[in-house]
Image (spheres, rainbow, N blue to C red):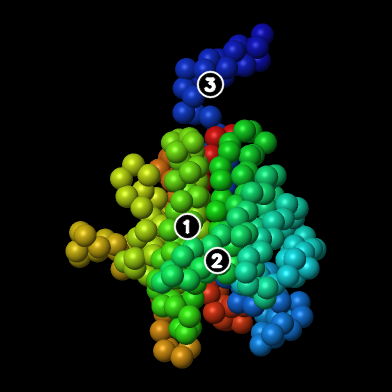
Amino acid sequence: MIRRCLITALAAVLILAPWALPAAQLRIATFNVENYLDAPISYREAKSPEARAKVRESILKIKPDVIAFQEMGRRSALIELQQSLKKDGLDLPYIEHASGWDTNIFVGVLSRIPFKPRSYTNENFLLGGRRFKVSRGFARVDLQTTNGFAFTLLSAHLKSKRAIPEADEAEMRLEEAKLLREKVDAILASDPSANVVVVGDFNDTRDSRSVRALIGRGKTRLVDTRPSERNGDNTPSSNPAWDPRTITWTHYYGKEDSYARLDYILISQAMQKYWAPEETYILALPNWGVASDHRPIVAGFNVPD
């Protein structure tokens, strides 16, 4: 009788206070793995065993539910990483490998959550009277958890800052960002309440034209989660118009001996309701540079369970 009363009381609490329902932690990460090749291609060397091991160590520290990759090699390289992670205890059975005009490096996704792949692999733009193709394509996967929480992940690796004779690299990067933004706008036009996450190596700073174009404005503006190191920094900025002076760099450029934030996790305003800033960070790992010239970033979300 007592047990029956307790069950009845608990049911009443859950009905009257839906906010009391438990939440499930969702981790979404992105990582430029710097030429993760299983065989040499063109001028790019195969990834060394030491570098592969450090990539796995980084991913295992994060334990992502979904992780996007840039500078991934052929599909066989992504499968090798997937299988190696599984041997180490992290099973990400769902895979997407998106190709583009570049036949050396690609973008990819591994996930423990089932998804429908809908990547864009043949995008192009007109610049200066000449038609260019998006080098790495845009990976897109539509995911749904077992409890019915749905969201779309878009991943990109925009044009690098390396100068080329055909066109200005910043203009090319801006045109690629505009195309990616069109994909976001199409999703939000179809469903303004859509949960959208846009991640990747955008190869520029937040005040650049390309990143600003991708973030957008107004009701469809994307939210910059701005991951930073978990090193104890917690003081606000002295200038209220600026972000706090936390450490947010994700890329090291040896030629200039410079550090910059080039990797992002952007989310739609609907997705922001579930965002957990305290679970959003840059992984700071000893000897991180063995894995890549980029550091992985992760954003956490408390989704309905």
First in residue order: circle 1 vs circle 2: 2
First in residue order: circle 2 vs circle 3: 3
**Looking at the image, which residue sits at the far bottom?**
255
The residue pinned by badge 3 equals 14
Hey, what amino acid is under mark 2? Val
Quadrant location of the C terminus?
top right
The 10 Å Cα crowd at callout 3, few under 14, some 14 to 19, many 20 or more, is few
Side of 127 relative to 289 (left or right): left
Instruction: Kindly report which numbered mark, 3 or 1, lies closer to the viewer in this rendering.
Output: 1
The residue pinned by badge 1 equals 179
First in residue order: circle 3 vs circle 1: 3
Hey, what amino acid is under mark 1? Leu
Q: Tell me what residue is drawn at x 63 percent, y 65 percent.
A: 100
Q: Foreground residue, 191 or 14?
A: 191
The residue pinned by badge 2 equals 134
Side of 183 relative to 208 (left or right): right
Hey, what amino acid is under mark 3? Leu
Q: Disc 1, disc 2: CB below 8 Å? A: yes
